[in-house]
Image: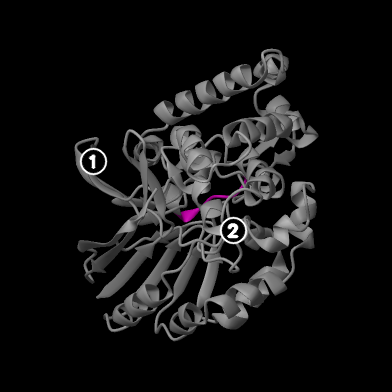
Amino acid sequence: MKHVIFISDTHIGDGSSKDDFNQDEVMESLVLDWSTLENPELVIVGDGLELLESDAVRKLGVTGFWETVDLIDRTLIDKIVSVHPKVFKSLANFPGKIWYVVGNHDYYLWKNRSLQQALKEYLPNLEIVPYYLNTQAGILAVHGNQFDSINKFKEVDGELVPPLGDFIARYMMVNFDESLRSYVPEEVLRDYDNVRPVLDVFDWLEKISQLYETSVDLMKVWVDNFLEMMKHEEAKSWMKKNYPALSKLSILFLNRTGGIRLGEFIVRTVMKVRNLRKTDYLKKAAMKIFVNPSWMKKNMDGYLDKRKTYDFEHSALNGIVMGHNHKPSFDVLKIKGELKFYLNCGSWKPVVERRGRNMFQRYFEIFYAITKIESDGEIEIITGSINKLRKSQII
């Protein structure tokens, strides 16, 4: 018998303003409990570490993606471990193997050998992989950013084009974050990244402007920064290589005629369409993988070599586990007459969500799944969640 535990998107960071992870004692306790299970393995389904939104990356400014990958060194791993010692001590003492599936906020780990070596020094029982597959139970785990057009890599004419989402995060961290820091407390700086659904960020910014009586319109500052970001060469190059036809219309997107009203309208429209289109896009991707596992390989640019054959392409899949969109769920699906399951591990980051017409609340919903795998391949799945709500965290 074996027990495989799945968690995702812990985003354990370096203690800077973008480090939302403050559940050290909870994770320590859970890892200790999981350690008592028979033959345990732990699978971190991507974005276990917050490397993208770190001080080390912020200090590099708006550099090119691959230059950023090369310039990050092991001191970032050392810093994260020093800020969260209880977490890493419990993981180092975990009796089974830890599979670290690479996502998009920790992709630098996949391409930077110095970061890999540093992390493995702290966690010798860890293996860094692009996906996890348990052939006995037929369970596949992949982060999910590979099926998100904004956050996936794409090979175009032999060139690996990095995701626009990475550039947006770095640009706004260097520019908008610094503007926001001038007007609101540091803890508020963390929140705008966590507003769900994303479209509500405009109303949240209006609420924050009123609450702190800022001398500027924060929504205008955000939109202005976003529009300037889209003028940057890296953003324009991404548009041209991913959407060559649409890139010709970018002059309309970047036109400042009409000022903030035009910019806000365009950004709102883009965000709304994306939000509606992607309501269950990861579950839809899982359904496609069940039907044709090779479809996943076609979307794994930057993670897999398309010329090679991988074990998941010829395995009988019973379940697929993802993370990425921070929405925990467990669904039983009927695929070609057979029952399969799709599981999303959610996130350990806080969520800032509208609770009323003019009210937002910050809360945590920590989710995990334990699969009990018998010697004959029979599986039992137990899901658990921890919710943290505080009345004082209503905005």
Can you say whether 258 is above or below 110 in the image?
above
Task: Categorize mark 1 by other alpha carbons within 10 Å: few (<14), some (14-19), many (20+).
Answer: some
Specify the quadrant that holds the N terminus.
bottom left
**Magenta residues (range):** 307-311
Task: Categorize mark 2 by other alpha carbons within 10 Å: few (<14), some (14-19), many (20+).
Answer: many
Identify the residue at image location x=43%, y=74%: 24
Q: Is residue 350 visible?
A: yes
Near-viewer residue (244 or 362):
362
Q: Which element is circle 1 on?
A: strand
Could you say which disc has been placed on residue 135 in the image?
Answer: none
Q: Which residue is mark 1?
A: 333
Q: Which residue is mark 2?
A: 106
Instruction: Say if the magenta span includes residue 309.
Output: yes
Can you say whether 125 is above or below 301 in the image?
below
- Mark nearest the camera among 2 and 1 is 2
Type of residue at label 2? Asp
Q: Position of residue 299 (x, y in %)?
A: 54, 40
Type of residue at label 1? Leu
Identify the residue at image location x=54%, y=50%: 309
- Colour scheme shown: one colour
Can you say whether 318 is above or below 201 in the image?
below
Majority secondary structure in the magenta region = loop
Q: Quadrant of residue 325?
A: top left
Q: Position of residue 292 (x, y in %)?
A: 40, 38
Instruction: Say if the magenta span includes residue 280.
Output: no
Label 2 and label 1: CA atoms lie apart by 30 Å
Can you say whether 149 is above or below 108 in the image?
above
